[in-house]
Amino acid sequence: MADAPKAGEFCWNELATGNVETAKNFYGKLFGWEFQEHQMPDMTYTMAKANNKDVAGFWAIPKEQQKQMSPHWLSYILVEDVEESVKKAASLGASIVKPVSRAGDFGSFAVIRDPVGAHIALWQPAQR
């Protein structure tokens, strides 16, 4: 696919919110997005679609974490090797917010805080 992101490019956006239904209502009406829910072992992950293409993901911030975590969008950057990218980021002054974790059969990700305090996620798909 010609327009598929390459390593080092943004590849996904994700909304963490305390109210997925309100977010779906808002973005569905604003952009015409449709939604498909996927049951994961510990959560429901909602995929937003535009023109039959997955464009974003939504997940619910657990109630016990909602006072510590504000609703936010998080962008993902495609990497060839998430473990190596996390090590390199740390050597350049980043801190690890969420260590490398599996996302079902889709791939692996980590969340880092860059040296100026911004959060970004690194994504390595399971199959390339």
Image (spheres, rainbow, N blue to C red):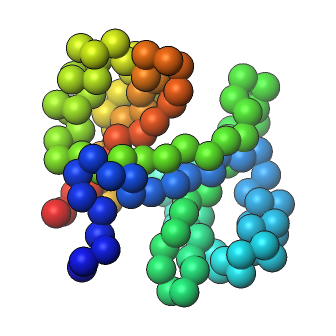
Relative height, residue 101 to residue 55 (above, below): above
Asked where in the image residue 61 lies, by quadrant, the reply is: top right
Q: Would you say 30 lies left or right of 111 here?
A: right
Residue 92 as seen in the image, left or right of residue 23? left
Q: Which residue is the extreme one toward the bottom?
A: 51
Residue 31 coordinates in the image, percent (x, y): 71, 75
Quadrant including the C terminus: bottom left
Picture residue at 23% right of the left edge, 38% below the top: 82
Where's residue 53, x and y in %? 47, 80
Horizontally, residue 102 falls left or right of residue 40, namely: left
Residue 127 in the image, given as x and y percentages of width and height: 18, 63
**Foreground residue, 10 or 38?**
10
| Placement of the N terminus among the 4 image quadrants | bottom left
Question: Is residue 118 depicted above or below 80 in this figure?
Answer: above
Q: Which corner quadrant of the image does residue 105 belong to?
A: bottom left
- Name the residue located 34 percent from the left edge and 13 percent from the top edge: 93
What's the residue at 79%, 52% (across, down)? 19
Q: Is residue 106 visible?
A: yes
The reply to whether residue 124 is visible in this rendering is no
What residue is shown at x 24% (from left), y 58% (from top)?
6
Q: Nearer the viewer, residue 59 or 122?
A: 122
* Location of residue 25 with respect to 79 vertically, above or below: below
